[in-house]
Image (cartoon, helix red, strand yellow):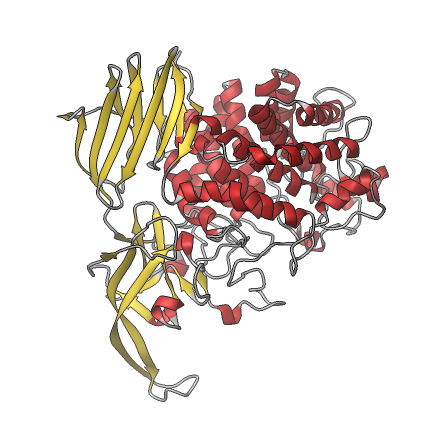
Amino acid sequence: MKQHSIPLEADQVQVTDPLFGSYVRLVGEKLIPYQWEALNDRIPGTEPSHCIDNFRVVAGQMQGGNRGAIFQDTDLYKWLEAVAFCIQNGTGRQYIPIADEVIELIGQAQCEDGYLNTYITIEHPENRWKNLAEGHELYGCGHLIEAAVAYYKATGKRNLLDIAKKFADLVVQVFGPGEGRCQGYPGHQEIELALVKLYRVTGKKAYLELADSFIRRRGARPNYLVEEMKGRHGHNIFPEFYEYDEKYAQTHEPPLQQSTAEGHAVRAVYMYSAMADLALEEGDDEMRSACVRLYNNIVGRRMYITGGIGSSGKLERFTADYDLPNDRMYCESCASVGLMMFSQRMATLTGEADYYDTVERALCNTVLAGISKDGDRYFYVNPLEVWPDNCLPSTSMSHVKPVRQPWFACACCPPNIARTLASLAQYLYAADEDSLYVNQLIRSTAKVEIGGAAVHADLQADYLHSGLIRLAVQSERPVTVRLRLPDYLKVDGITVDGKPVTPAVEHGYTVFALPGDAVIEVKASAPARFVAAHRRVRASTGRVALMKGPFVYCLEQTDNGEDLPALSVSPDAVIQELPPLSDLPGELPVLEVEGRRLTQTTGNGDALYDAPHFASEPTRLRAVPYALWCNRTPGEMQVWINAAR
């Protein structure tokens, strides 16, 4: 039986792309030291994290109570995971001493039995495992495990891995399958996918069995989390949980029976990622089918054009099919990271290349938009339309920020973006026993052993400019290359060593059986295009968006003046591609198109309401990649443009 492909590790790939290469370097050069300062509360004018201080209090190095969010420990764990990937990809070895020092601190904060949670240990040691709906204890354990696995792979050092195993072993004792164990499960899923990672590193099957058990307990009756909350009689950690319902934490029915993506978007895609992992490890067709259903519901009816998910600013959740408002949604950066994780796992599980379309969509738009070009400002929420004047506190728009923020009191997104970009290799390439999979057209080099032979690949992808994709492969033995060529490409010809070929397409991959060393060249273009939404997406009815390749474009006030909703464009207009802007990274072209600006709507221009009188004038619309918006002069932003008909 053919093996499933395995994504490559960070030390097997070098990203040379002018856009993504710059961001990968940015993580090692700026994000890691900047976020370390933030975790230590040393960035003036930002909300304090208290993260490191909480560990110091538990370790007995300082006095005080627990401060900050109850899940603040995980900011450090994700930062450590990002450090591990930077060490692995060659941009972060200078951080090993500081990482080792903070790992020692984490060890000192760990209880003798393995328990590790600064909030509970400092404030409520008697309440272990008594508030699974809100407490984030298992969520914290999951992120600790992920950091430990990454750091072990990067350095070979076991200190953090041993700390994580000790905590995981305690969780197995408390929650593992069998009589007399707690039948609870995480309020915020994450540990499930982490336990699969720990199983793959250690081979200890108890971790895999516990992950599976956590998934299968959800949706059972009586509902464990709901009953737990009833017992607190409204005394919740999070005041907003007075509106808590079963769908919020995906406990409304067993996950294997669910068919629509519901509730908190990050929790959902983290759980789906674990389900895809478990379906692969256990050969579970029922779980695989559930993953396919849930994925199809997201990308077919509940995902934004930018790869954002989570339509509601209230409780950060999915809502209804086609409910995709542009100005007040949530689209948390973490949710798009989770969608990348889920989609990648679905590609591994099924062997189908199309799942990487969604990885690409989220990566090239929402995930990159979540970070400034200088690496020191972040978006938590990622709207598709911003009017700064109405982003007011204490209103329904208070969650939308018109500019990136230097930090957050709840700062889960910045280190999540950092660990994702630092580990970009896993989304670019994969390999099995006879094939190299090229999953993203991002300039890079890769090295891997396939069939006992060393294989080296050099990808030069310039389809946004010259139209050439060139993959040079070096291998001492025959090797199969499976190249994903997205649907937005117009392919004009393919050659191998200069000779025209018509390769087969299998599972969405263009397949090349190479005798050894060879050069594949694909002549292709990705012309800029207009895109419309399904007619049931009410917020975008009668509107169009601009795209080039996987990149969604947007209008900004700095290029187009204020009052962007007054602009319109014909879907038949000719889109002109202009040179990249020198003050934006990545060498992505600017798009320009003839449009119109509405200059009058009523007979009396000063009246709030009056008889209709419409007038407009021609204007040029200039669009830049959504991923790079708000890196210049702040102001209005808009993705969807009124279509002139």
Q: Residue at x 41, y 54 (%)?
A: 628
Q: Residue at x 57, y 20 (%)?
A: 200
Percent coordinates x, y for residue 35 in the rendering: 61, 47
Q: Is residue 543 above or below residue 271?
A: below
Observer-nearest of 188 and 248: 188
- Residue furthest left as drawn: 500
Q: Quadrant of residue 393?
A: bottom right
Percent coordinates x, y for residue 457 in the rendering: 33, 25
How many badges with numbers are in the image?
Answer: 0
Q: Is residue 354 above or below residue 530?
A: above
Q: Quadrant of residue 626?
A: bottom left
Image quadrant for the N terminus?
top left
Percent coordinates x, y for residue 467 in the rendering: 22, 41
Q: Residue at x 80, y 36 (%)?
A: 128
Is residue 106 visible to us here?
A: yes
Image quadrant for the C terminus?
bottom left
Q: From the viewer's perspective, is 563 left or right of 498?
A: right
Is residue 294 visible to us here?
A: no
Q: Is residue 434 above or below residue 139?
A: above
Percent coordinates x, y for residue 554 in the rendering: 37, 59
Q: From the viewer's perspective, is 451 left or right of 278?
A: left
Observer-nearest of 480 and 286: 480
Q: From the viewer's perspective, is 238 left or right of 466?
A: right
